[in-house]
Image: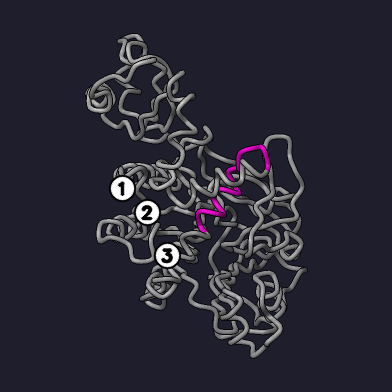
Amino acid sequence: MDQMPPADRAGRNDIKIGEMWDEVWAYWDLHIGKRVHDFSMLEDQRYILDQMIKIFEEQKVDGVLIAGDVYDKTVPSAEAVQLFDEFITGLAKAEIPVYMISGNHDSAERLSFGAKLFENSDIYISQVYDGDMKRIVLKDQYGPISVYLLLLKPAAVRHALQRDDINTYEEGVMAALQECEIDTTQRNVLVAHQFVTGADRSDSEETWVGGLDNVSAEVFKNFDYVALGHIHRPQKMGRETLRYSGTPLKYSFRKQIIKSVTIVELLEKGNVRVSTVPLIPRRDMRKLRGTYMDVTAKDHYTAENKMDYLQITLTDEEDVPGALQKLRTVYPNLMRLEYDNKRTRENREVQAVEAQEQKSELELFEEFYELLNNEPMKEEQTEFVEKLIQNLKEVRV
C-alpha cells in the first residue's frame, strides 16, 4: 500500500489508508424495517439489497457511501438489524469498503456500536460529533482523497466547540467544516444527512426542501462531491456533484419514480463523472382506478403485476360488499382501497369532521396546507413535515 504524507492537521478521527479509489457507488436512506400501510417491506428490502451487492461486484466498485437513515426507527426490530448485518457482511466479504453515517430515523449511538472494530473490515461509521469530524484519507493514481463523514446537531457542535453562537443546523455545519481546515487543492468528498436549500431549479424537479434544519448548498462549495441523505427522491441540488440518491424502494403512491443507485467516478481534481443505474424492485408500488368489474377483469392484470403493492380507487356508484377482501384474492398486496363517485364527492364535506379523527397528523397538515395555498404539498415538503412530526413525537417520549 502507498503511504500517505502527513496531513497538515491530523485530527484524532483521521484514518489514512492506501486504498485505490476510482469509483464510489453512493446509496443511502435505506430505511430498513419500514412498514407501509402496515405492510412489512423487509423481504422487498432484502431483494433490493442483494441486487445492489451484485451490481457492486459486477462493476468492481471501490466503495459504498450510506448517508443516514439506515433503519426506519430509532430502535429497529431484530429482523431489521439482521437484514442490515447481512448486507454489511456481504459488502465486507466482497471487500467493498463502506463509509456510513446515521440519520434522523436511526440512532447514532446504536449504529456506531463496534465502530472501531468494524474499521478492520473497512467499514467506517461516523460517531456523535465531538469536535472532530471523521475523515478517511484514501489514495489513487491522481493523489489523495479525503472522505468526511458529517453527523451533527447544533447542540452537539455548540457543546463540543464551546460556542454559544451556534443555534441552527447551518451554523453548526459551517462551524464543523471550519474546524476541519479542508485542503481545497486536493479532492474532498462529504457524506451528510441534511435538508439543503439554495439550489437551482431544473425542468423536471423542484429543489425547495425547506424546514427548520435547512443548510444552504453554498456551505458545501469546497467539496468535489457531496453524498446527501434525508430526501427520498433522487435529485441534484444546483450542481451535478451535490446530490440526493434517494431510497432504493418506493415508499409512497404519490409519484412514480424510477429508483436507482448513483455511481460517482472521481478522476483528477475538478473531473467528476456521475451516472445512475436503475434498480428493479421485487414488487412495484402503483395505483389502479376503475370500476370493480374493470379492475378484476383478467385482461386488466397479469401474473407479473398482480403481486404489486397497490392503491385501488373504485368508481362504482354503489359500494361493493366485501370489496377489500375480494380484491385481495386477485391482488394480495392491496394496501389501500378508496372510492371516488358522486356519493363520496357529495358527502365529502359531511364526512370530513368524522374523518379528521381518523387521519394522521401528516394528512391533517397536508389538508391545511392545500387549503391555505390552493395547491397540494410537494413531495419534498411532505417528507420534511413527516420527519418533523416524527422528531416531535420522539421528543415527547
Is tag 2's residue or tag 3's residue first in the polypeptide sequence? 2
The image shows residue 262, relative to residue 194, as above or below, that is above
* Residue type indicated by callout 2: Ile
Separation (CA) of disc 1 from disc 3: 16 Å
The residue located at (30%, 46%) in the rendering is: 40
Residue 70 lies in the magenta-colored region: no
Q: Quadrant of residue 155?
A: bottom right
Q: From the top left corner, tell me how far across and down residue 68 is, in percent.
A: 49, 61
Is tag 1's residue or tag 2's residue first in the polypeptide sequence? 2
Q: Are marks 1 and 2 in contact (CB under 8 Å)?
A: yes
The residue located at (47%, 69%) in the rendering is: 124
Q: From the top left corner, tell me how far across and down residue 61 is, in percent.
A: 50, 51
The residue located at (55%, 56%) in the rendering is: 230
Say which residue label 3 marks.
106
Image quarter hosting the C terminus:
bottom left
Name the mark on residue 250.
Answer: none
The answer to which of 360 and 269 lies nearer the viewer is: 360
The residue located at (64%, 59%) in the rendering is: 211
Left or right placement of residue 196 versus residue 129 in this view: right
The answer to which of 88 and 295 lies nearer the viewer is: 295
